[in-house]
Each structure stands twice: as C-alpha cells, then as structure tokens.
Amino acid sequence: MFTAKPQFPMWQYLNQPLFHLAYPLILNPRRYWFHYRVELLERCLMQSCESQGQRD
C-alpha cells in the first residue's frame, strides 16, 4: 500500500494573513504544521463520501 507523506506547506506558511482576527499569525513552524494538519483533517471529514451511500 502506498502512503503519501505530506510535505510542509511552505507557501501557505509564508502567505499567512497579517492582523486578521479569524486567522491568527503562527510564527512557529512546528505549531503551524500541527494547525495545518488539523484543518486538513477537518476539511476531509466534512466532505461527503458519495461512493458509500450509493448502491445499484
């Protein structure tokens, strides 16, 4: 089984919004990496999985 190891999102880290209350600036790369993975997991869990609900 192939597992893809995600790389650090350097572009997103460098393009963080400044002075935005909804998105706090995270300067620590390890903390940003943890925060990014949590948000990625939340986005993946919010997607609907249509293949499991359909039967022919």
Image: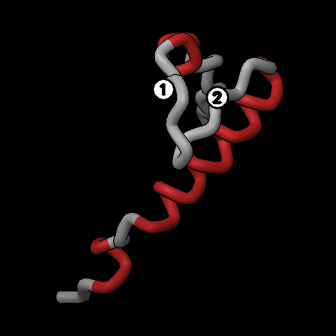
Residues at marks 2 and 1 touching, judged by CB atoms closer than 8 Å: yes
According to the picture, the residue beneath numbered tag 1 turns out to be 17
Between residue 51 and residue 16, name the one nearer to us: 16
**As displayed, is residue 29 above or below residue 32?**
above
**As displayed, is residue 48 above or below residue 2?**
below
Between residue 37 and residue 14, name the one nearer to us: 14
Percent position of residue 31, x then y: 80, 31
Q: Residue at x 38, y 65 (%)?
A: 47
Percent position of residue 55, x then y: 24, 88
Between residue 10 and residue 4, name the one nearer to us: 10
| Residue neighbourhood size for the residue with mark 2, other residues' Cα within 10 Å, grouped as few (<14), some (14–19), many (≥20) | some
Q: Residue at x 82, y 24 (%)?
A: 30
| Residue placed furthest toward the left | 56
Q: Disc 2 or 1, which lies upstream in sequence?
A: 1
Q: Amino acid at mark 2?
A: Leu
According to the picture, the residue beneath numbered tag 2 turns out to be 25
Q: Secondary structure at mark 1?
A: loop
Q: Secondary structure at mark 2?
A: loop
The reply, left or right, for residue 26 in relation to residue 28 is left
Quadrant of the drawing holding the N terminus: top right
Percent position of residue 4, x then y: 59, 28
Q: Amino acid at mark 1?
A: Pro
Quadrant of the drawing holding the C terminus: bottom left
Q: CA distance from mark 2 to mark 1?
A: 7 Å
Q: Residue at x 54, y 29 (%)?
A: 19
